[in-house]
Amino acid sequence: MTTKTQTTHTPTPWYVNGSLIAPTRTGKRFAIAEIFRDNVQTAKANAAFIVRCVNSHAALVEAVEDARDTLIGMGSPDKTDYADVETAITRFDAALRLAKGQE
């Protein structure tokens, strides 16, 4: 019988330090990745985009799961309270701000 071990990624949040993606603000201990391009500005922009995507992933997943649960619940005939909808919208808005780099 073979046992498979689950490898996990470096915990978030991740940070950008030039073209380095690091688990700390300074990136002094080690880098998760370094982005290489002929154009240094493009490499930095790509690193920033990757970090923004990684750091917003959990919030987006949670917001979508909440919205899904809310929409399923709205199908119930006794559902008259829209507080769950407002909560889902609030979480969507927060996740979208994070994904767009506005937080």
Image (cartoon, rainbow, N blue to C red):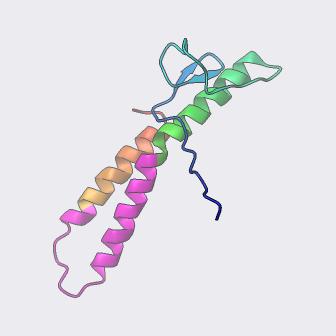
The part of the image, by quadrant, that contains residue 51 is top right
Q: Nearer the viewer, residue 83 or 15?
A: 15
Q: Quadrant of residue 4?
A: bottom right
Q: Image quadrant for the N terminus?
A: bottom right
In the image, residue 72 above or below residue 55: below
| Residue bounds of the magenta highlight | 58-85
Residue 66 in percent (x, y) is at 34, 62
- In the drawing, does residue 67 fall left or right of residue 87? right
* In magenta segment, residue 67: yes
Total numbered labels placed on residues in the image = 0
Residue 48 in the image, given as x and y percentages of width and height: 59, 28
Question: Quick check: is 77 in the magenta stretch?
Answer: yes
What residue is shown at x 43% (from left), y 39% (from top)?
A: 98
Task: State whether the magenta stretch is mostly helix, strand or loop.
Answer: helix
* Residue shown at the point (22%, 88%) measured from the top left: 77
- Compared to 53, does 24 lie above or below? above
Toward the right, the furthest residue is 38
User: Where does the C terminus fall, quadrant-wise?
Assistant: top left
Looking at the image, the residue that sits furthest to the front is 1
Residue found at x 47% / y 42%: 56
The one nearer the camera, 29 or 36, is 29
The image quadrant of residue 31 is top right
Q: Classify residue 77 as left or right of residue 71.
A: left
